[in-house]
Structure formats: structure tokens, C-alpha cells
Image (cartoon, rainbow, N blue to C red):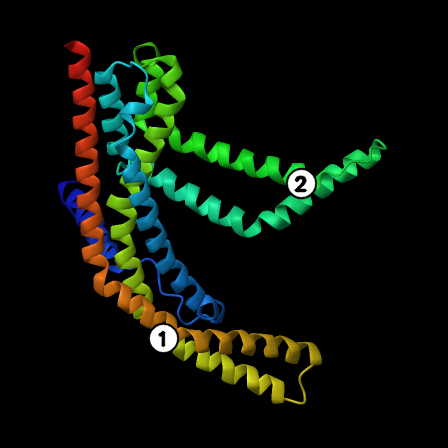
Amino acid sequence: MKWSWLVAAALVFGTAACNSKQNTVLVQSASGESAYASRFPEELQRARNDFLTRESEARQKLQAFANYPSELDKPDWKQVKAVYQAADAAGHSSAYVQQARENQSVTRFFDEEKEEISKKVAGAANYAAKQKSCKVEVYGPASHALQKSVEKQLEERLRAHNEAHSLIADNAEALGKPNREKLEKQADDIAATSYAVRVQNPESIDELKRRVDESKDVGSTLDRVIEEAKAVEADSARADADKKAATARRERAEKAKSELETEVSAAQKLLEEMENRVKALQEEYDKAFKDLEGAVDGKASEGSA
């Protein structure tokens, strides 16, 4: 029994160790896939622009930090400071980060598909109205209501993973009910800025590096796709529908190929300065938040004087 137990244990640990080595890389690059390669320049541009946009938006929010205390009317400043600190911590907590990433995926999907989804929702509403002999235009109201509903639910999901909102709810009287909405918005912005500065922007460096590293293989894939499509177009035995599809595929690949070098060059240029920019923004955030805490302490001192 003793030996059989040892053998079983050895097999378990040996298998685990083997699997650990085998599973080091779980996700393979899609650079050899035609669809991925054809949209690669667009995705590379998006990754670069996302970083620049977050950087700009973060600085705008940091400037607003200084005004937070003056927006509140006689709250318990000790509790206000606790809310701010909880929001700051939430921005790089695993729960918040996971939900924020999910929200971003949903937001991107909805932004890209909003028109088509709105058409279908409005179409269903129009059909229901016609069944009841109602003549009303529902596309505009339906589209607006759908967008607002999605935004509201995403906000609620993210707030559920931001401890600052629990503190606001638990200390409503001490914080002052008239201050609640303003504090909720402040807690949202602090957490979002903390997340952008401490998590998203540093991750963007690795993301952009990965994409630049893929660019050579992507270029080879695009060349292959173009040649394969040309072969189909020139094949008299192929159906017209196949040739039409090949032409569309070739044109997409040629467009991507023409944009690839420009986008890779722009990404490489940004990469040269990203680490310094990320570090600089983190320092700006730390200073702005420290100044905010100091301003709250000052308000608390005034109240106790």
C-alpha cells in the first residue's frame, strides 16, 4: 500500500509538472489567419489610440480632484477620506479590474453593433405597435432607451465591485444625503482613473509590443492571402461567386498591407516613450491623490476648530 501510494503521488506530481511546462503558452498568435491579418492595422491603431485617449482622460480627471471637497456640503470628512481611499484601492483590486474589463468588452461590442441592434429592437417595437393599430415612430426613443439602459447596468455592475460605494451606502447620514450623488460620481472617477493609470496603461506597453512583434508574420500572411486570391480569380474553373469572394478578400488584404508599415512605425515610435509616459502619469496621479487627501484633512481641521 505504501509503495502504491508513493507511485500514485509520483504520477500525479509528474503529470502536473509536465502539464505546467506544456501549458506555458495557452494562447497562440493568430497572425497566420487571414481575417486577423486583414484587420491587424486597424487593431494596432486602436491599441495606440486607446492608450493616448486614456492618458488624456486621466489627466482631465486628475485636474478635477482638487475640486472634490468644495463640491460637498458639510459631510463627515473622516468618512469622505475613507470613501476616496477605498475608490483609489478599488481601481487596482482584482474584483474591480475583472469587472472593468468585462464592461469594456460589452461597451466596445455595443458601440460597434449599436445601430444594428437598435434597428432590430425598434423593428420589434414597431411590429407590436402596428398589431395594436398604433402609428408612432419608435426608432429614436428605442435606440436612446437601449443605450441608456446598457450604460446604467454597466455602471451598476462596476459600482458593485467598488468598495467606496458600500461605504457611501453604509454612512449615508454621516456623509450627508445631499452629497450622495456627487460622492458616487467622485468615487467612480477616482476608481476609473486609478485603474487606467495603474493597470491599463502599464498593460498597454506589453500589448503594443506583442502586436508589433506579430507584424512581420502578419505581413507574410497578407502576401499569401493576396496571391491565393489572385489564383482563384484567374482560375476559369472557379464559380463567379468564388471569384467575387476572392476579389473582396484580396482587396481587404491589399488595403491592410498598404497600411501596415505606417501603423507599425507609429506604434514603434510610441513604444519608445511609453514607459516614461506611464511612469510620469503614475507620479501625477499619486501627487493629485495625496493633495486630495490633504485637502480633506484641511476641511476636517476647519470643522474641528
Q: Is residue 18 above or below residue 9?
A: below
Q: Amino acid at mark 2?
A: Gly
**Which is more N-terminal, label 2 or label 1?**
2
Q: Nearer the viewer, residue 160 or 168?
A: 168
Residue 200: x, y in percent?
30, 48
Q: Quadrant of residue 136?
A: top right
Q: Is residue 11 above or below residue 182?
A: below
Identified at 22% across, 62% down, the residue is: 273
Identified at 78% across, 39% down, the residue is: 127
Q: Amino acid at mark 1?
A: Asp
Residue 177: x, y in percent?
38, 13
Q: Nearer the viewer, mark 1 or mark 2?
A: 2
CB contact under 8 Å: marks 1 and 2: no
Quadrant location, the N terminus: top left
Mark 1 burial class by Cα count in 10 Å: few <14, some 14-19, many 20+: some
Identified at 32% across, 16% down, the residue is: 73
Estimate the spatial distance between the alpha carbons at disc 1 and disc 2, rounded to whole Å: 45 Å
Question: In screen coordinates, is 244 left or right of 76?
Answer: right
Q: Secondary structure at mark 1?
A: helix
Identified at 23% across, 51% down, the residue is: 16
Q: Secondary structure at mark 2?
A: helix
Residue 29: x, y in percent?
36, 65
Residue 271 is tagged as: none
Residue sticking out furthest to the right: 133
- Which residue carries the number 2 mark? 140
Quadrant location, the C terminus: top left
Residue 170: x, y in percent?
33, 14
Query: In this rendering, does residue 54 appear at all?
Result: yes
Question: In screen coordinates, is 33 left or right of 88?
Answer: right
Mark 2 burial class by Cα count in 10 Å: few <14, some 14-19, many 20+: few
- Which residue carries the number 1 mark? 217
Q: Nearer the viewer, residue 96 or 146?
A: 146
